């Protein structure tokens, strides 16, 4: 199948061709037709499957076929959890709408709101936003969502995990009841299905790949190692392997900062990216990582989605996540668009149960290696780590993970995360 057979306009086909694409991905092939028909869509798609174009292209076509109002109120709202993902989607919207009379904008926290407010005042057809800044501007009467025709909730599972449920509910109340709804999620937990039932009307369900599976072209490996030797091992792997572009995940912001400092002191150019970093610092780090001036980017899970880095060869889990689905999203940063990639996890004794949960989720045993001189501590406890209540998070997959707690406790935890993440 080609894009020509999906019913897209000549202007969109021209933009698609300019980007060098000729064949739609499975999620694009399945999602675009029902969206063009005006139906609500609930889609399951992993990172790197082309899902952004799956909703952006038909959305732009629908808007371009409608009547453009002189003052250009927001007609399409794309809600996403992180600044990086919002910026990436906005770039895609701009590229695909190059030959259309469509105005778009992106808003998120962490930067001065004045330029964003000025752009909105001039008129915007498509608005890409994170929840916090969107509600802030609405509360200040700078922004109205009364004319929204299409509502897109992207990375819905990540939204729930970051505690944005109440914000989503508030936003829903600000947009017209009569609208087209598109919801994209990498996982379909009970909470996601409950959210979908409250937003979507007789949705068409589409799925690009089996739920919670990892990309086949990614070579996965586990190094069992003593916790105290992880830093030395990761420096050895990067240095001796002469790896020039490596994305490393830590569990905490503090851990990301510490590891970055140790990398730099060992002669490896590195930068950290997480929620406590200013938007300017995050943008600079990402640009340096993409252009090769920074070899290693150390990130928390805020960067697990939304980073569009072509042909990223290496992802390392310095600490594996306690939420199994996060593993899938982390390693999904490599092996994108059919390219090969390597995902390495450094696992200490207290992460044993996390590794077991991950292997159950992906349905495979990950090969394990031990490097001489970096052997795991035979006397170390395998009791799961307890770090800032991290184990109390309700898993997005809705499974029987030990981290599941009562709904009340989960709500309280989500409320706290929402306060911290409003910078998005």
Image (spheres, grey):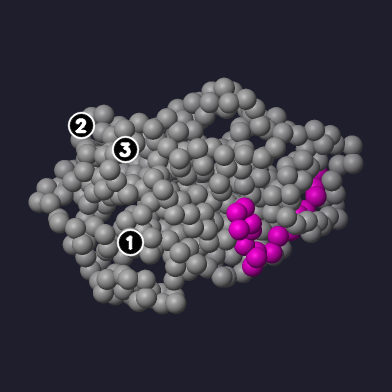
**Residue picked out by circle 3:** 134
**Residue picked out by circle 2:** 141
Q: Of 103 and 194, which appears nearest the observer?
A: 194
Q: Which mark is residue 304?
A: none
Picture residue at 80% right of the left edge, 33% below the top: 383
Disc 1 residue crowd, few under 14, some 14–19, many 20+, Cα 10 Å = some
On the question of residue 393 being in view, the answer is yes
Does the magenta segment cover residue 228? yes
In the displayed structure, 320 sits above or below 296; it is above
Circle 3: element type? helix
Residue farthest toward the left in the current orientation of the protein: 70
Circle 2: element type? loop
Which numbered disc, 3 or 2, marks the residue that appears first in the sequence? 3
Q: Are marks 2 and 1 in contact (CB under 8 Å)?
A: no
Marks 2/1: CA–CA distance = 32 Å
x%, y% of residue 85?
43, 50
Picture residue at 14% right of the left edge, 55% below the top: 68
Magenta stretch, residue numbers = 210-237
Q: Of 16 and 121, which appears nearest the observer?
A: 16
Circle 1: element type? helix
Viewed as shown, does residue 359 lie left or right of 36? right
x%, y% of residue 8?
31, 70
**Residue picked out by circle 1:** 36
Q: Nearer the viewer, mark 2 or mark 1?
A: 1
């Amino acid at each position: 199948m080609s894009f020509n057979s999906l019913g897209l306009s000549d202007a969109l086909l021209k933009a698609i061709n300019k980007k060098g694409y000729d064949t739609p991905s499975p999620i694009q092939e399945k999602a675009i037709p029902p969206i063009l028909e005006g139906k609500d869509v609930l889609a399951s798609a992993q990172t790197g499957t082309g899902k952004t174009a799956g909703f952006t292209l038909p959305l732009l076509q629908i808007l371009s076929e409608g009547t453009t109002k002189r003052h250009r109120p927001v007609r399409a709202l794309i809600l996403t959890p992180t600044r990086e993902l919002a910026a990436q989607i906005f770039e895609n919207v701009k590229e695909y709408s190059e030959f259309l009379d469509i105005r778009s904008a992106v808003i998120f926290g962490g930067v001065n709101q004045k330029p964003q407010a000025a752009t909105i005042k001039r008129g915007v057809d498509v608005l890409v936003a994170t929840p916090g800044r969107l509600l802030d501007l609405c509360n200040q009467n700078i922004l109205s969502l009364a004319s929204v025709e299409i509502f897109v909730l992207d990375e819905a599972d990540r939204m729930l995990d970051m505690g944005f449920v109440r914000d989503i509910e508030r936003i829903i109340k600000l947009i017209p009841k009569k609208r087209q709804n598109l919801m994209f999620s990498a996982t379909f937990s009970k909470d996601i299905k409950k959210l979908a039932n409250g937003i979507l009307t007789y949705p068409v369900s589409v799925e690009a790949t089996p739920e919670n599976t990892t990309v086949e072209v990614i070579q996965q490996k586990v190094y069992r190692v003593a916790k105290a030797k992880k830093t030395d091992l990761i420096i050895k792997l990067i240095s001796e392997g002469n790896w020039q572009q490596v994305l490393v995940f830590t569990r905490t912001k503090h851990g990301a900062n510490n590891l970055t400092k140790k990398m730099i002191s060992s002669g490896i150019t590195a930068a950290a990216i997480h929620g406590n970093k200013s938007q300017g610092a995050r943008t600079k780090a990402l640009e340096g990582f993409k252009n090769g001036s920074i070899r290693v980017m150390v990130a928390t899970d805020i960067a697990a989605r939304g980073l569009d880095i072509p042909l990223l060869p290496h992802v390392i889990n310095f600490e594996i996540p306690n939420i199994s689905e996060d593993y899938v999203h982390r390693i999904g940063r490599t092996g994108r668009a059919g390219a090969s990639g390597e995902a390495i996890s450094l696992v200490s004794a207290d992460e044993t149960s996390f590794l077991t949960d991950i292997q159950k989720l992906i349905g495979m045993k990950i090969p394990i290696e031990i490097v001489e001189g970096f052997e795991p501590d035979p006397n170390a406890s395998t009791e799961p780590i307890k770090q800032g209540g991290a184990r109390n998070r309700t898993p997005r997959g809705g499974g029987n993970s030990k981290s599941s707690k009562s709904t009340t406790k989960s709500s309280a935890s989500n409320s706290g995360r929402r306060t911290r993440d409003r910078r998005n």
